[in-house]
Image (cartoon, grey):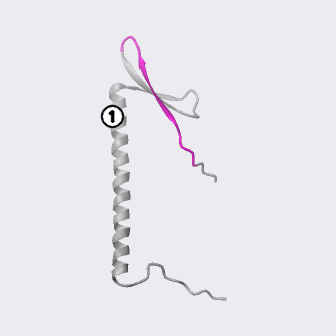
Amino acid sequence: MQQANQAQSFGLIIQEGEEEVSVKLTLEGFKDVALCLSVQQARAFASDLIQLAHRIEVKRSLKMAKIKATQSTVERAGMPLILSVSQQA
């Protein structure tokens, strides 16, 4: 299975109708596909997206802190960080 590492572009458009204003979210490469959100829905979506990004950053930060703590413990014990494995011929 091939996996594409391409950044997706998206667009945000403010649509003003006679009765209400909405936000239209489009994704590059998906013609005729868009999310039309009310102002309240757009605000909730943005808030959820920010919270999700924050959780990802915190999880990554905790993981890196744990790795650094483990490395520090190994270094204080005087053990090498990389152990060599003898190869059999």
Q: Residue at x 36, y 57 (%)?
A: 59
- Residue 71: within the magenta? no
Left or right position of 24 against 39: right
Percent position of residue 82, x then y:
48, 79
Q: How many marks?
A: 1
Query: Position of 72 compared to 10: left or right?
Result: left
Q: Which residues are magenta?
A: 5-19
Of the residues shown, which amino acid type is indicated by label 1?
Answer: Ala
Quadrant of the image containing the N terminus? bottom right
- Residue 30, given in percent of the width and then of the height, sits at 57, 33
Which residue does the numbered mark 1 point to in the structure image?
A: 44
Which structural element holds mark 1?
helix
Taking the spot 37% from the left edge, 35% from the top edge, the residue there is 45
Q: Residue lying at the far right in this picture: please name it.
A: 89
For residue 15, side relative to residue 2 (left or right): left
Q: Where's residue 24, x and y in %?
A: 45, 26
Q: Residue at left 38%, top 68%?
A: 67
| Front-most of residues 49 and 12 | 12
| Pointer 1 local density, CA inside 10 Å: few below 14, some 14–19, many at least 20 | few
Give the vertical position of 11 relative to 6 (above or below): above
Give the vertical position of 59 relative to 50 (above or below): below
Q: Choose top left, top right, bottom left or bottom right for residue 86.
A: bottom right
* Residue depicted at 34% across the width and 65% down the height: 65
How far from the left and from the top, in percent, is residue 19? 36, 12
Say whether residue 16 is magenta. yes
Image quarter of the C terminus: bottom right
